[in-house]
Amino acid sequence: MVDFAEAAAHNEEVFRSINERIEAGAKQHGVGQALPFHCECATDACVETIELSPAEYDRVASHPARFVVVPGHEQPTIETVVEQHSTYAVVEKTGEARHEIEREHPRPRHQG
């Protein structure tokens, strides 16, 4: 049986992967204005987006345990809000959810 922390980490990493492709495309084409990034919350059915500049997304995503979420999509049992903005929050994974991300879902930007 998959526990909540493991399922949440998987869902967030799916959205992170999509968002990193958006960010890479923006960099490749020199796009600097805000783009719709997917909410990286733990809910697999979430389809909401957050308008962020590629540079702002990169700033958040450069920390392996931090994710952008729509306000109200935080999961206090597995993450802490570390930044609150008018249109999004930045959460940092804690406990087992953080260990799951670090162990099972390493990102190329966070290695070496």
Image: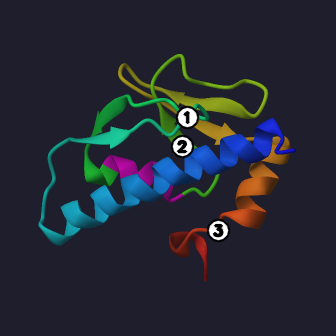
Amino acid carrying label 3: it is Pro
- Most extreme residue toward the front, as rendered? 1
Q: Secondary structure at mark 3?
A: loop
Amino acid carrying label 1: it is Cys
Q: Earlier in the sequence, mark 1 or mark 2?
A: 1
Q: Earlier in the sequence, mark 2 or mark 3?
A: 2
Q: Is residue 48 left or right of residue 36?
A: right
Q: Which mark is residue 52?
A: none
**Pointer 3: residues within 10 angstroms few (<14), some, or many (20+)?**
few
40 or 60, nearer to the observer: 40
82 or 64, nearer to the observer: 64
In the rendered image, which residue does mark 2 sit on? 67
What is the spatial separation of the Cα atoms under label 2 and label 3, in whole angstroms?
A: 14 Å
In the rendered image, which residue does mark 1 sit on? 41
Q: Secondary structure at mark 2?
A: strand
Q: Is residue 30 visible?
A: yes
Q: Main secondary structure of the magenta part?
A: helix
**Pointer 1: residues within 10 angstroms few (<14), some, or many (20+)?**
many
Asked where in the image residue 107 lies, by quadrant, the reply is bottom right
54 or 24, nearer to the observer: 24
Q: Which residues are magenta?
A: 56-62
Q: Is residue 27 left or right of residue 112?
A: left
Residue 36: x and y in percent read 26, 39
Quadrant assignment for the C terminus: bottom right
Q: Secondary structure at mark 1?
A: loop
Residue 71: x and y in percent read 48, 20
- Name the residue located 71 percent from the left edge and 34 percent from the top edge: 79
Q: Which mark is residue 106?
A: 3
